[in-house]
C-alpha cells in the first residue's frame, strides 16, 4: 500500500514503508519556471546532473577524510552515463556520498515543499548568499531533468548505511519514495534514470551526449565514462583533470595549442598564451589566448567577447562581457569556486565578484601585452597588425587605462614607411617651437599621406600621425594629450606652425598678387551656402586649396562618420583655405579682376569641388562639376 503524506510531516522513523508525497506547489507553474525562465537550452539537464554527481563524489571524499568507515568503502570517484535505446533512458550514476530517505525528502522535495513563492525568494536570497559551496544542488538543477523526461527515478544508497531507496516522479504533482532491494541498489552513491519523452530522443545519440559532456562538463573534477548501451565497453569522455588546473610546468605548448583550437574554433597557433592563478579575496584560475590571426567576427557590430566561465570546473556559461569590448579577440576560460551561485547559472556572470575578476583579468592581459611590446617587437608587431584597431577602441572607451594603452599603440605617420611609430618616438622627434602632436584622420593611410592639409607640416619636417581607423576620429577628441603635448588635427582650425622653420626656404618666393584679397571676398559671397569661410592658408605649399573644419567644429573625418549615421545636424560647413602662391590661385585672381565674376565663377566652383575630391569626397553636384570641367578643358588652348 502507498501511504500519502506531507513531506514535512513524514514519520522519519518509519523506514520500511513506501510513501507517496503530494507537492504543495503548483508543479506545472514550477516546471514552467524551470524550463522557460531559468534555463534556455534543454541540454542543460545533463550538465546539472553531472554537477550533482561530481558534488556527491567531492562530498564523499571530504567526509572520508574524517570518517574511517567512509574511507574504507570509498573508491576512486567516477561518473558513468549509460544510454539505453530500447528503454529510451539515460542513466547518470556516481559513486559519491549517496542519499538517505531523509536526504531525499529534504533535497528532492525542497522546491515543491517550499512553494513557488518561497522558491523565488530562495533564488533572490542566493544572489547574495552562498552557504553551500557546492554547484548545482539537488532540488534545484535536478528538476531540469523534467525538460526532457516523462519520468525520473533516483536509486540511491548513502555510503556507510544498510538501506537503499528509490525516488520516482513524473513531475505532475506527486513523487514517491520507497525502499529498494539492495540487489538492485548501488553499493553506495546514486543512479538517476531519465525516461525520455518523445521530443527528446536526440539525447539517445552517443555523439550528442559526448558533445554536451565535452563542452559543458569536460573539466569537472570527476572522470566521466560513457556507455552507448548497457553492457558495452565504456569510453572515457573526461579524465577529471582540467588543463588549467595543472601546473604550467606540466603542460606542453602542444597541449596549450590543442586546447586553444578547441576553445576558439580556429586552426592557427595562439600569438600569446597566459596562464595564471589569482589569490586573495576571490581565488580563480585563468587560461587566456590571443589568436594568431583575426577571428571572422572581430568587427561584428555586437562587439562581444567569448569567455567561458567555470565554477569548480563546471561550465556555467559563455560570458560575453567579462572583458571590455576592446579585448573581445581574447579567448579565455576563468574558473572560480568563490562565485555566488543560484538556480540561474546565467545570473552568476552578473555578480560583483565576476565584475571584479573581469577588471583584474583586463589589467593582467594589459601587463602581458606590455611585456611582449617591450621584449619581443616582432611578435607584438604581429599582434598589433591583427588587433591594433580593436585595442585602440580602449583609448576612447576606457579612459582609466588610456596611459597604459598609449604605451602599446602604434601609428602610421609621415615619417614611417613600413614600420609603425610610437608616441614616444613622436615626442623624441619634436621640432623646435612645436607645441602639439599633429594628426590627420581618414580611411586610408596612403591617401592621408598625400592630403594637401599636411603639406606645410612636411615642408617643416613636422611629423603627422596618419590615423586611418574609424575609432581614431573619436578617441583624439577626448584624449588630453601625451607627455604634456595635446593632440591637434591638421584639418581643423588655424594652423599654428608658422613659428617652426621651413627645411628649405626659397630665396625668391613668388609674391602674393594684390587682387587675392578680392578673390577671397568673391569666394565668400559665391560659396556662402556651402562654405563657412574662405581664408589665406599657411598650411598649403603645393596644392591650390583645401577644406578644413572650423575651430569650434568637428574634425572632418568625425563629421563624415556622424553624417553617415544620421547626425548631419551636428555638422558645420567647412572652411576653404587657398594658397596665394599657387599659380592656379594667381591666375583665378587675375581672371576675376580682368573679366569679372561671371567669367570666373565656374573656376571658383571648381576650386572648392577639387578640394572635396582631394579629401576623398564627391563634388557637391557631380553632374554640374563634370560640365564645368569639360567646359574648362575646351577653353584650354
Image (spheres, rainbow, N blue to C red):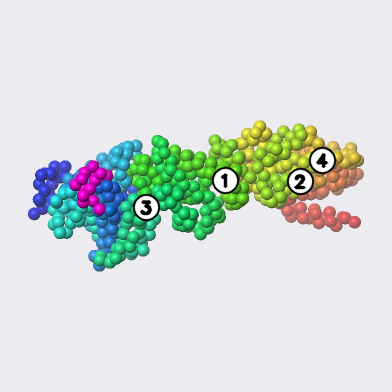
> Where does the image place residue 47, in percent across and percent down from the top left?
33, 53
> Where does the image place residue 228, in percent across and percent down from the top left?
30, 65
> Which region shows up in magenta?
62-75
Observer able to see residue 139: no
Q: Residue at x 69, y 37 (%)?
A: 427
Few, some or many C-alpha atoms within 10 Å of disc 1 (few <14, some 14-19, many ≥20)? Answer: some
Q: With 614 as the anchor, is 92 left or right in this view?
A: left
Few, some or many C-alpha atoms within 10 Å of disc 2 (few <14, some 14-19, many ≥20)? Answer: many
Mark toward the viewer: 4 or 2: 4
Secondary-structure class at tag 4: loop
Q: Quadrant of the C terminus?
A: bottom right
Secondary-structure class at tag 1: helix
Secondary-structure class at tag 3: loop
Gap in angstroms between the C-alphas marked 1 and 4: 37 Å
Instruction: Read off the residue under disc 1.
Output: 372
Classified by dominant secondary structure, the portion drawn in magenta counts as helix
Mark 1 vs 4, N-terminal side:
1
Q: Residue at x 61, y 36 (%)?
A: 478
> Where does the image place residue 209, in percent across and percent down from the top left?
34, 60
Q: Quadrant of the N terminus?
A: bottom left
Taking the magenta stretch, the answer to whether it contains residue 270 is no
Circles 3 and 1: CB distance less than 8 Å? no
Instruction: Read off the residue under disc 2.
Output: 452
Mark 3 vs 2, N-terminal side:
3
Circles 2 and 1: CB distance less than 8 Å? no
Secondary-structure class at tag 2: helix
Gap in angstroms between the C-alphas marked 3 and 2: 62 Å
Instruction: Read off the residue under disc 4.
Output: 503
Instruction: Read off the residue under disc 3.
Output: 241
Q: Residue at x 66, y 40 (%)?
A: 423
Amino acid at each position: 500500500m502507498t501511504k500519502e503524506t506531507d513531506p514535512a510531516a513524514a514519520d522519519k522513523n518509519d523506514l520500511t514503508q513506501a510513501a507517496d508525497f503530494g507537492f504543495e506547489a503548483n508543479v506545472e507553474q514550477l516546471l514552467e519556471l524551470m524550463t522557460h525562465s531559468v534555463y534556455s537550452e534543454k541540454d542543460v539537464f545533463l550538465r546539472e546532473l553531472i554537477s550533482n554527481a561530481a558534488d556527491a563524489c567531492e562530498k564523499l571524499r571530504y567526509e572520508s577524510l574524517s570518517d574511517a568507515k567512509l574511507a574504507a568503502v570509498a573508491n576512486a570517484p567516477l561518473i558513468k552515463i549509460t544510454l539505453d535505446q530500447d528503454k529510451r533512458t539515460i542513466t547518470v550514476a556516481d559513486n559519491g556520498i549517496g542519499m538517505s530517505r531523509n536526504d531525499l525528502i529534504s533535497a528532492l522535495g525542497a522546491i515543491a515543499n517550499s512553494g513557488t513563492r518561497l522558491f523565488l525568494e530562495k533564488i533572490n536570497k542566493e544572489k547574495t548568499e552562498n552557504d553551500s559551496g557546492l554547484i548545482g544542488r539537488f532540488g534545484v538543477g535536478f528538476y531540469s531533468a523534467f525538460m526532457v523526461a516523462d519520468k525520473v527515478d533516483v536509486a540511491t544508497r548513502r555510503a556507510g548505511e544498510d538501506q537503499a531507496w528509490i525516488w520516482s516522479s513524473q513531475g505532475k504533482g506527486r513523487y514517491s519514495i520507497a525502499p529498494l532491494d539492495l540487489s538492485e541498489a548501488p553499493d553506495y552513491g546514486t543512479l538517476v534514470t531519465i525516461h525520455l519523452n518523445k521530443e527528446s530522443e536526440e539525447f539517445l545519440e552517443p555523439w550528442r551526449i559526448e558533445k554536451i559532456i565535452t563542452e559543458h562538463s569536460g573539466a569537472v573534477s570527476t572522470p566521466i565514462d560513457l556507455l552507448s548501451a548497457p553492457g558495452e565497453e565504456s569510453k572515457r569522455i573526461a579524465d577529471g583533470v582540467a588543463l588549467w588546473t595543472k601546473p604550467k610546468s606540466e603542460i606542453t605548448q602542444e597541449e596549450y595549442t590543442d586546447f586553444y583550437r578547441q576553445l576558439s574554433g580556429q586552426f592557427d597557433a595562439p600569438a600569446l598564451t597566459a596562464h595564471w592563478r589569482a589569490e586573495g579575496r576571490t581565488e580563480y584560475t585563468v587560461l587566456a589566448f590571443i589568436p594568431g590571426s583575426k577571428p571572422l567576427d572581430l568587427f561584428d557590430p555586437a562587439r562581444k567577447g567569448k569567455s567561458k566561465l567555470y565554477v569548480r570546473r563546471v561550465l556555467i556559461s559563455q560570458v560575453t562581457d567579462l572583458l571590455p569590448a576592446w579585448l573581445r579577440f581574447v579567448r579565455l576560460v576563468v574558473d572560480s569556486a568563490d562565485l555566488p551561485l543560484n538556480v540561474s547559472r546565467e545570473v552568476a556572470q552578473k555578480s560583483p565578484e565576476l565584475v571584479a575578476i573581469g577588471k583584474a583579468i583586463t589589467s593582467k592581459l594589459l601587463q602581458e601585452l606590455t611585456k611582449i611590446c617591450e621584449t619581443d617587437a616582432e611578435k607584438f608587431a604581429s599582434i598589433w597588425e591583427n588587433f591594433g584597431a580593436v585595442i585602440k577602441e580602449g583609448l576612447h572607451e576606457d579612459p582609466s587605462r588610456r596611459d597604459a594603452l598609449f604605451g602599446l599603440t602604434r601609428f602610421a605617420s609621415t615619417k614611417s614607411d613600413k614600420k609603425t611609430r610610437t608616441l614616444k618616438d613622436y615626442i623624441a622627434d619634436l621640432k623646435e617651437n612645436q607645441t602639439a602632436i599633429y594628426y590627420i584622420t581618414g580611411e586610408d593611410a596612403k591617401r592621408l599621406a598625400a592630403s594637401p592639409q599636411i603639406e606645410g607640416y612636411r615642408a617643416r619636417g613636422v611629423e603627422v600621425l596618419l590615423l586611418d581607423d574609424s575609432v581614431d576620429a573619436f578617441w583624439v577628441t577626448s584624449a588630453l594629450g601625451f607627455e604634456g603635448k595635446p593632440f591637434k588635427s591638421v584639418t581643423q582650425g588655424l594652423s599654428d606652425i608658422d613659428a617652426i622653420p621651413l627645411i628649405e626656404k626659397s630665396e625668391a618666393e613668388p609674391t602674393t598678387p594684390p587682387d587675392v584679397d578680392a578673390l577671397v571676398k568673391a569666394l565668400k559671397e559665391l560659396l556662402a551656402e556651402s562654405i563657412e569661410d574662405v581664408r589665406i592658408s599657411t598650411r598649403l605649399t603645393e596644392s591650390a586649396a583645401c577644406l578644413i573644419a572650423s575651430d569650434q567644429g568637428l574634425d572632418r573625418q568625425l563629421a563624415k562618420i556622424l553624417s553617415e549615421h544620421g547626425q548631419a545636424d551636428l555638422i558645420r560647413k567647412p572652411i576653404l583655405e587657398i594658397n596665394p602662391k599657387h599659380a592656379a590661385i594667381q591666375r583665378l585672381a587675375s581672371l576675376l579682376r580682368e573679366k569679372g565674376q561671371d567669367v570666373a565663377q565656374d573656376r571658383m566652383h571648381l576650386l572648392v569641388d577639387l578640394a572635396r575630391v582631394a579629401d576623398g569626397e564627391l563634388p557637391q553636384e557631380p553632374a554640374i562639376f563634370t560640365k564645368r570641367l569639360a567646359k574648362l578643358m575646351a577653353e584650354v588652348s
